[in-house]
Amino acid sequence: MKADDKMKFYSLDEVIDEHVGPIGTPKRDAFEEELRLDLLGKAIKEARLQRNLTQQQLGDLVGVQKAQISKLENSLTDARFETVMKVFKALNAKVNFSVELLNQSLPVIQ
């Protein structure tokens, strides 16, 4: 590379826009949903490991099978909200949610 050649840098948002699609498109929405589920699974696994629990032990605390904990941690299932909350309660973990309203009009049912 010559001294006068400049490397172009791209932001993560630019790369995602280019390869997945812009915000608001079905492909981007699906990508972001999958990412959120993956992050949730990683948070569950990290908290479980910090508590020195096996998947079986956590499943026993929650009242689900070990396989369900594995699926949650690996984002292989759409678990019920109630189950996810039970998992975090069993892990003695504080959960915070953020709700963001998008600039979309909602249909009014009369």
Image (cartoon, rainbow, N blue to C red):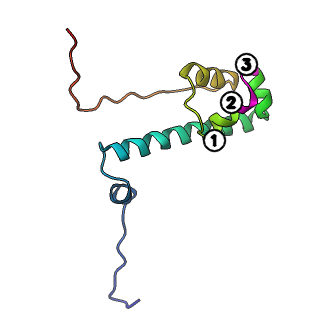
Give the vertical position of 52 relative to 1 (above or below). above
| Residue 48 drawn at (x, y percent) | 71, 34
Q: Earlier in the sequence, mark 3 or mark 2?
A: 3
Residue picked out by circle 1: 74
Mark 3 residue type: Gly
Callout 3: SS: loop
- Badge 3 crowding class, 10 Å Cα cut-off, few under 14, some 14 to 19, many 20 or more, is few
Q: Is residue 36 left or right of residue 88?
A: left
Q: Earlier in the sequence, mark 2 or mark 1?
A: 2
- Does residue 15 lie above or below 94 as drawn? below
Q: Is residue 104 above or below residue 6?
A: above
Per the rendering, the mark at residue 66 is none
Foreground residue among 39 and 95:
39
Image quadrant holding the C terminus, namely top left
Quadrant in which the N terminus is drawn: bottom left
Q: Quadrant of residue 94?
A: top right
Distance in Å between CA atoms under marks 2 and 1: 10 Å
Residue linked to disc 2: 68
For residue 74, side relative to residue 17 (left or right): right
Q: CA distance from mark 3 to mark 1?
A: 19 Å
Q: Amino acid at mark 2?
A: Gln
x then y, percent, for residue 6: 34, 81
Residue at the image position 40 percent from the left and 57 percent from the top: 12
The amino acid type of the residue labelled 1 equals Asn
Extent of the magenta region: 61-67
* Neighbourhood count class around disc 2 (C-alpha, 10 Å): few under 14, some 14–19, many 20 upward: some
Of the numbered discs 3 and 1, the one sitting upstream in the chain is 3
Q: Position of residue 22 (x, y in %)?
A: 30, 50
Q: CA distance from mark 3 to mark 2?
A: 10 Å
The circle on residue 63 is 3
